[in-house]
């Protein structure tokens, strides 16, 4: 049995508290949590960086990546227009 099934995780995304009920999040899901529903375009690039709280496990995400969520995780998403 999955011990995290039905669990809510509190994350800090771009300085704001967000609650998610999934143990894994895709790159696109993280962007949508940060900016709402975003339709990908070739002119906009997102940079996603995260740290996992106490253990300071840090990393970044690119399209296609999936991260395992941890309570208190800090995620920063920046949006850049290439034009």
Image (cartoon, helix red, strand yellow):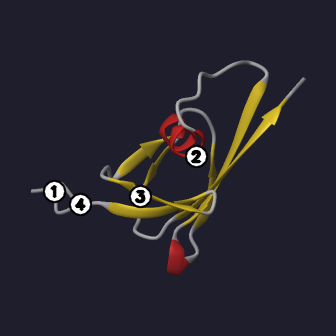
Q: Residues within 10 Å of mark 3 (few under 14, many from 20)?
A: some
Query: Mark 4 highlights which residue?
Result: 7
**Residue closer to the observer: 9 or 69:** 9
SS at badge 2: helix
Q: Is residue 57 left or right of residue 3?
A: right
Q: Which of the two discs, 3 and 2, labels the residue nearer the N terminus?
A: 2
Q: Are marks 4 and 1 in contact (CB under 8 Å)?
A: no
Query: Mark 3 highlights which residue?
Result: 69
- Distance from disc 2 to disc 4, alpha carbons, whole Å, reads 21 Å
- Distance from disc 1 to disc 3, alpha carbons, whole Å, reads 14 Å
- Distance from disc 2 to disc 1, alpha carbons, whole Å, reads 27 Å
Q: Which of the two discs, 2 and 1, labels the residue nearer the N terminus?
A: 1
Task: Indicate the position of residue 71 as horizontal and vertical percent values.
Answer: 40, 69
Query: Mark 1 highlights which residue?
Result: 2
| Comparing labels 4 and 1, the label whose residue is closer to the camera | 4
Above or below: residue 20 compared with residue 72: above
- Distance from disc 4 to disc 1, alpha carbons, whole Å, reads 10 Å
Q: Which of the two discs, 2 and 4, labels the residue nearer the N terminus?
A: 4
Q: Which mark is residue 34?
A: 2
Task: Indicate the position of residue 4 as horizontal and vertical percent values.
Answer: 22, 60
Above or below: residue 22 compared with residue 72: above
Please report the residue visible at 86 percent of the width from the left and 27 percent of the height from the top.
82
């Amino acid at each position: 049995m999955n011990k995290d099934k039905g669990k809510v995780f509190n994350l800090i995304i771009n300085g704001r508290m967000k609650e998610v009920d999934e143990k894994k999040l895709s790159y696109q899901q993280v962007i949508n949590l940060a900016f709402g529903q975003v339709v990908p375009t070739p002119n906009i690039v997102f940079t996603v960086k995260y740290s996992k709280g106490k253990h300071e496990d840090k990393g970044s995400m690119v399209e296609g990546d999936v991260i395992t969520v941890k309570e208190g995780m800090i995620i920063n998403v920046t949006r850049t227009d290439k034009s």
